[in-house]
Amino acid sequence: MANELELSGNQYKDTFLAGLWRENPVFRLLLGMCPTLAVTTALKPALTMGYSVIFVLLCSNIVVSLMRNLLKPHLRILMFTLTIATFVTIVDIFLKAFQPEMSAMLGPYVPLIIVNCIIICRAEVCASKNGLGVSIIDALGMGIGFTLALSVLGAIREIFSTGKIFEIQIMPDWFVPCAAMAMPAGAFITLGMLLGLVNLISKRKS
Amino acid sequence: MSKIKYFLKQSWLLIICSFCFGLLIAVVNAACLDRIEKNKIEKLNSLMSGLMPKAEQFEKAESFTIKTTQGKEFESNIYKAIGSGGVVDGWAFNCQGPGFQDKIELVVSVDKVFARFNGFAILASNETPGFGDRIKNSFYRNQYIGAPAGELQLVKTGNTETIDSKIVAISGATVSSKSVLNIINSNVRQIKAKMIDKGLLSNGK
């Protein structure tokens, strides 16, 4: 019994950590590139998108895991999409009600979470094959991993494009802001450099 | 009969989930609707103040049912901008119509005699980021400030500094530029006619 508990504890830890580094959705699996590139002009929209995805991922993983034994194989993608769309609509309503500025800033990218590959990938790969515990931990790991990746990108782009973070000046007076970092080119350049860095660290580790 | 049984056997989970999820969305929507409406009113007030900075307060004067260019009906609220000394400074109203991807909602402001535009602001739009959403940019919006409040025309090239009835389209976003122009033309024409009918505006004769 003790061994079983220890094994499941290790499994949970491994599942959680996989989303943060080894299978990070942005840096390792290259999933969810659309919001990664589009909403990381600053840290605040990146964080908002991050916690929206965590909520949708967590809720859809819970629902899919609970109904996994009832799913007909040929209807499963339809069921996943229906589940994901429901929680994305709820997030969209909450943002409009409680964070109208962020809702306006993120615009169509909130409804677009429905077609975010990370969520449907986790429903198919993990939640439809595992119990509730593993599905929740997987959703948290992947969601936090995605949020961290977006936050790093958002912070770098905000600092270099405005010299500020959360409206607080952090760069010295001589710093000249680079407007290109807030544009799509800045997103591609920053993501490319971060992917290179992650690959370098992974190679050195192995 | 067997076909119906087969259908139900295959899709019962889908039917139940659709019903439950629909109910969940309806409950959340009902719970947040008041707050969303309140946010919209606050945004509308701040946009109207931006369009008419001299106005001290906005008073709802009337509400009209307007048809969009697609024939759909919506409620347009007409606000009277009151300046210093209680004098009417201009009018502002919400307009809407089809955009490139989704409907575009605008706030349009005109002067007190409906002769010139004070400008427009975007209330809601889901136009393509980087292309259609440039209708929010000053390059496009500033062309409406002071333009005659009649039928506006969209042109592909021209001087954006010249304020007249010709509006220069945004390069790469012609459809969105045209959508905004059509919304303004169609809505302003209908609202002006209804305001004259109601006696809120002189017919100029």
Image (cartoon, coloured by chain):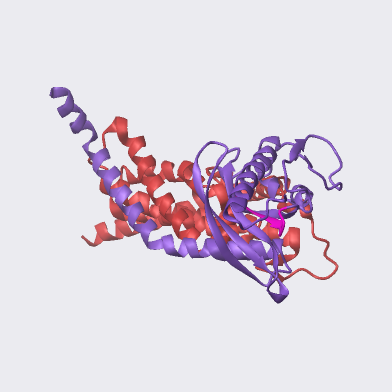
Chain colours: A red, B purple
**B54 w.r.t. A42: above or below:** below
| Pick the front one: A84 or A198 | A84
* Residue B106 is at least partly visible in this image: no
> The N terminus of chain A is located in which quarter?
bottom left
Residue displayed at 68% across by 48% down? A187
Q: Position of residue B135 (x, y in %)?
A: 69, 46
Q: Is residue B27 left or right of residue B144?
A: left
**Viewer-nearest residue: A62 or B77:** B77
In the image, residue A2 sits, relative to residue A113, either above or below, namely below
The residue closer to the viewer here, B126 or B189, is B189
Could you tell me how many numbered marks the image carries?
Answer: 0
Per the rendered image, the range of residues in magenta is B105-114
- Any part of residue A136 in sight: yes
Q: Eyeballing the image, is A204 above or below B53? A: above
Residue A102 is covered by the magenta coloring = no
Q: Quadrant of residue A123?
A: top left
Q: Determine if the magenta segment contains residue B108.
A: yes
Can you give x and y, in whole percent of width and height, for residue B82 in the image? 67, 69
Q: Residue furthest bottom?
A: B85
Residue B107 at x, y percent in the picture = 63, 54
For the point 86% across and 46% down, the residue is: B162
- The residue at 60%/40% (across/down) is B99
Residue B94 horizontal/vertical position (percent): 59, 54
| Principal secondary structure, stretch drawn in magenta | strand
Seen as rendered, the residue at the extreme left is B1
